[in-house]
Amino acid sequence: MHDEMSLSNAVEDPRPPAYTCRYGGRSYYISARMMDGIKRYVDQGKGVGDFLQAVICHDLWGAVGHADDENRDNLPAYCAFFHNHVPADCHGSREKYKAWIKKHADAMDQLDKDMDELAKDFEPEPQEQP
């Protein structure tokens, strides 16, 4: 329990919350600053910080231990968001977290190879010197 002297260690973000939900008669939210990291993870397979990684891996102890005051107080929003709006194969365990990142890294490696092959078609022909 926090007393009146407790200061939030959350970073101020002037943007409105990116996601809100209600549970048990109370509103919870995910801030825009945190949603940025979630989107990079889901869309691009980018790694995230300790708090989000714990949330993604369904590690309650880790999430609470790494959360700032704002995120700890809004954990139900993270649960609702991941359960309702994120592909099931990218959250739920550390193995799923690692596999999601690897899947995106492998896709990027393949894209790089494909781009290199395409670039060969556009390399200029060697010019003969007179």
Image (cartoon, rainbow, N blue to C red):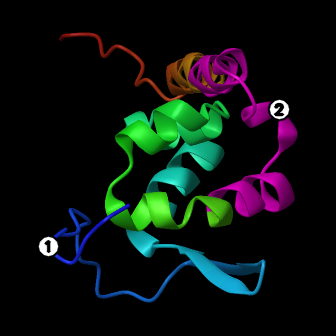
Q: Quadrant of residue 104?
A: top right
Is residue 45 depicted above or below 110 in this figure? below
At 61% from the left and 18% from the top, the residue drawn is: 98
Out of 108 and 2, give the one closest to the viewer: 2
Secondary structure under tag 2 reads helix
Determine crowd level at label 2: few under 14, some 14-19, many 20+ residues with C-alpha closer than 10 A. Answer: few
Q: Which residues are magenta?
A: 78-106
Whether 84 is among the magenta residues is yes
Q: Nearer the viewer, mark 2 or mark 1?
A: 1
At 21% from the left and 78% from the top, the residue drawn is: 4
Q: Position of residue 63 (x, y in %)?
A: 49, 40
Amino acid type at mark 2: Asp
Residue to which mark 1 is pinned: 5
Can the viewer see residue 34? no
Secondary structure under tag 1 reads loop
Whether 119 is among the magenta residues is no
Q: CA distance from mark 2 to mark 1?
A: 42 Å
At 34% from the left and 62% from the top, the residue drawn is: 69
Q: Position of residue 74 (x, y in %)?
A: 54, 67
Is residue 128 depicted above or below 96 in this figure? above
Residue 98 in the figure: left or right of residue 71: right
Residue to which mark 2 is pinned: 89
Residue 70 in the figure: left or right of residue 103: left
